Amino acid sequence: MKKRFSRRDFIFKSLGLTGGLLFFSPENLFAKEKSVIFVAKGKDVAKTTRSCIDAIGGISKFISRNDIVVIKPNIAWDRRVEQAANTHPEVVAEMVRLAYQAGAKKVKVFDNTCDDPRRTYKTSGIADAAKKAGAFVSYVNDKKFKKMMIGGKHIKKWKVYTEVIEADKVINIPIAKQHGSAILSMALKNWFGAVGGFRGRLHWGLHHSIAEIAHFFKPTLTVMDATRILINNGPQGGSLKDVKVMDMVIASTDQVAIDAFCAKYLFGIDPYDIPYIKYANELKMGVMEIDKIKIIRAT
């Protein structure tokens, strides 16, 4: 397999993704678009997140009064925010604040982590930021996993965290990063943090597992943290040399389209070269063809 992640192979400059401007606008329309991606860019993470949500129509378009809302970030690793292994805490906190402003009754934040959650929740900064914004932050409880029908050809049944299923609304907030086994970890891969059981088994047919597990969940909205992305040695990372600062937040109701967009425009990888995106497309979960996606810049 050819090397995918060397810096010289990136296409940031040719796509206008470097510097102070992001060259997408509402005029960037396609004749056959089926999905819409909203992109905001800025140094202030909270403001950039809010701008992105405002552009997509405002949080009240998705959250109603008295809703129980689950926000599902990536809190998998015992890594600091600048190491880009976990979702940025300010993206999470701003989404919590927005949900409450829309009238949510309760906002829950949790993740089934890889490292010890007592460390990951603290080191990532997510627990403190989310709590400060009013969220109910908890470690996953093994008693709340229930085996459910996934309905896939590869994964027929699996243990799913019931608090995700029981919520009125679910917002998926992954971080975009390189992944040693899955090529990239983005929206679809982030659902591994909402299931239990022996997750190593899911890696036996990893790309099918990613698509089928993600197909089970029906997020209200996906908000991608691309404020800084991990371009090498993912998903855990560690060295700041592996991090690229992008200052971007991306939102869509189509989690396949958002993964396809990030693969192409953040990492320079054809979405067709990532099997789980292809499988998700075959499951009719969303749109992966870039020329069918409308890309709108938040102003």
Image: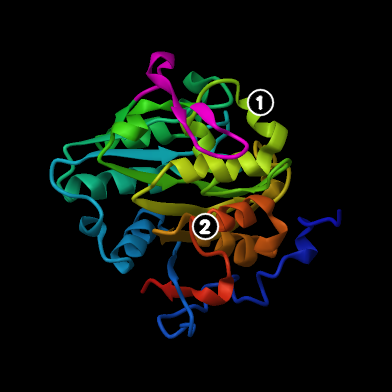
Q: Residue furthest right?
A: 1
Query: Of the residues under marks 2 and 1, which one precedes in the sequence?
Result: 1
Q: Which residue position is annotated with label 2?
A: 256
Q: Quadrant of residue 67?
A: top left
**Residue 170 visible in the snapshot:** yes
Give the magenta part as a residue range. 138-158
**Is residue 184 toward the left or the right of residue 217 in the image?**
right
Residue visible at 60% across and 39% down in the picture:
153
Q: Quadrant of residue 27?
A: bottom left
**Is residue 252 toward the left or the right of residue 199 in the image?**
left
Numbered disc 1: secondary structure = helix
Q: Nearer the viewer, residue 258 or 249?
A: 258
Q: Nearer the viewer, residue 39 or 18?
A: 39
Residue 233 in picture, x, y percent from top left:
73, 42
Q: Give the residue type at disc 1.
A: Gly
Q: Residues within 10 Å of mark 1 (few under 14, many from 20)?
A: few
Q: Give the residue type at disc 2.
A: Val
Residue visible at 42% across and 35% down in the picture:
126
Vertical arrangement, residue 298 with respect to residue 166, above or below:
below
In the picture, the disc for residue 200 is: 1
